[in-house]
Image (cartoon, rainbow, N blue to C red):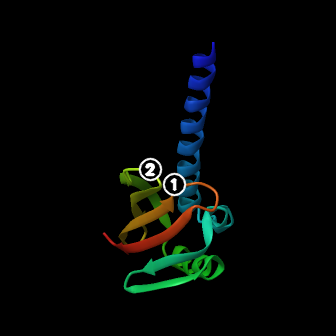
Amino acid sequence: MKNIVVLFFLVMTSGLNAQNEASFFAALKNNDTSIMDTYLEDNIDFCLFEDQQIMSKSAALTKLKSFLTNHKISAVEVIHKGSSKDKSSRYKVAKLTTNKDTFRVFVYASGEIGAKTVKEIRIDKF
């Protein structure tokens, strides 16, 4: 019985983590920076093309919102993901298709992509 309870919690935890990651990328697709706000650490490394800076999450969200306003998103597809050996950090790479161009989005997080874990966002031309 104890093993069943442990297995149940492991399955639920992995399901919730997948939902967190899916929610982050759904928020990106829907241009919902208020939801993305919950995922970002207070200061993040934000890179839009060649302009890379460590900034507050509010400044990063302002830049991201400006980018999303100028590029209507039609699709977001996670194309690669990975983690450190000890699972203390994770990253995902997504293909962002817009009305103007296609971009590569790199998201780096401490642990699972979840509340207050995203440390870095990079957006480059694909």
Residue occupying image coordinates x 58% and y 61%: 117
Q: Residue furthest top?
A: 1
- In the figure, is residue 85 to the left or right of 44? left
Q: Position of residue 125 (x, y in %)?
A: 33, 74
**Distance Cα–Cα, label 1 vs label 2:** 6 Å
Mark 1 residue element:
loop
Closest to the observer, 2 or 99: 2
Q: Is residue 81 above or below residue 5?
A: below
Numbered marks: total: 2
Closest to the observer, 66 or 93: 93
Quarter the N terminus occupies: top right
* One can see residue 100 in this view: no
* One can see residue 28 in this view: yes
- In the figure, is residue 7 to the left or right of 99? right
Q: Residue furthest left?
A: 126
Instruction: Specify the label residue 111 is tagged with.
Output: 1
Q: Position of residue 15 (x, y in %)?
A: 56, 36
Q: Is residue 121 above or below residue 55?
A: above
Q: Disc 1, disc 2: CB below 8 Å? A: yes
Displayed quadrant of residue 27: bottom right
Mark 2 residue element:
loop
Q: Position of residue 41 (x, y in %)?
A: 61, 69
- In the figure, is residue 23 to the left or right of 103? right
Residue occupying image coordinates x 38% and y 81%: 49
Residue under pointer 2 = 87
Residue occupying image coordinates x 63% and y 21%: 5
Q: Amino acid at mark 2?
A: Lys
